Image: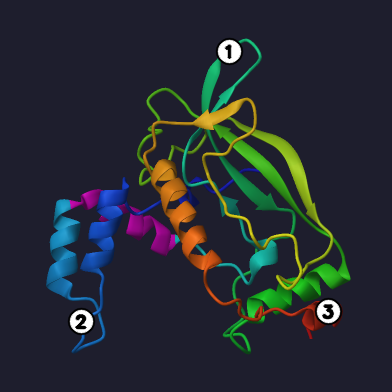
Amino acid sequence: MPAPLAGWLLVVRNAADFNAFLLASRPDPRTHRPDPSRMGGFLARHPETGRALALLKARALTSGFANDTYNSLDSLIFVNAEGTATAVRWAMVPEEAARPPEGPGVGRDYLFHDLIGALARGPLRWHLVVTVAGPGDPTGDATVPWPAGRRQVDAGTLTLVRAESEEGGPCTGITYDPLILPEGMGPSDDPIPAARSAVYARSFTLRSGEAVTASAVTGTAIRSGGQ
């Protein structure tokens, strides 16, 4: 079950470039669109971003969450019991066959409701496909895809059997930190995860002081199978 290597991309190499990319793509207050000269200047200074954007635009979209592939983007280091380190990237590849979008959905949250409906019909499964780096494959630059043909290992299966609303669910009051890893896994020389770790911690602190708003996907919607 090969994973689509071209999907493993970020459009910038580090946090400073990401900040510059956001500033360059900020809409002009008169046109409400990015300033072509400002974005053009950024792309001239960062050709890796242009190459990554072209690859991402060429990637086929799927009809929803249930048949899409979820990629790690950043490289990780696996270390075995003997201390041998191996660079990898991973993807969660669905058992359900990918289908193209059938058209615009109904309502803002239609993708969530479609997923709830799919789970009401039965479990959904993804395979954890680990791709092993070859000689010279970059681990510190997430804008560059690894070549096709790299060794891939089906390392396990994730099975989803039901959905839960944020209201009273187990995912409130926690934050995602890409540097909290299990034994045998560690970060690579990619600078992005460290930046994400710091930003997510700050975001969690700020959100903890905000008023709680109702979840867009309610328990009632889940009990009704997304209808």
Q: CA distance from mark 1 to mark 3?
A: 47 Å
Q: Residue sitting at 25 percent across and 81 percent down?
A: 33
Note whether residue 196 is visible. yes
User: Of marks 2 and 1, which one's residue comes earlier in the chain?
Assistant: 2
Residue 223, how many percent across, how many down?
86, 79
Q: CA distance from mark 2 to mark 1?
A: 52 Å
Who is closer to the viewer here, 156 or 76?
A: 76
Q: Residue sitting at 87 percent across and 65 percent down?
A: 122
Label 1 sits on residue: 83
Amino acid type at image mark 1? Gly
Q: Secondary structure at mark 2?
A: loop
Q: Is residue 100 toward the left or the right of residue 18 in the image?
A: right
Q: Residues within 10 Å of mark 3 (few under 14, many from 20)?
A: some
Label 2 sits on residue: 28
Residue 40 is one of the magenta-drawn residues: no
Who is closer to the viewer here, 172 or 14?
A: 172
Q: Residues within 10 Å of mark 1 (few under 14, many from 20)?
A: few
- State whether residue 167 is above or below residue 60: below
In the picture, residue 212 is in which quadrant?
Answer: bottom right
Amino acid type at image mark 2? Asp
Residue 4, how many percent across, how many down?
54, 49
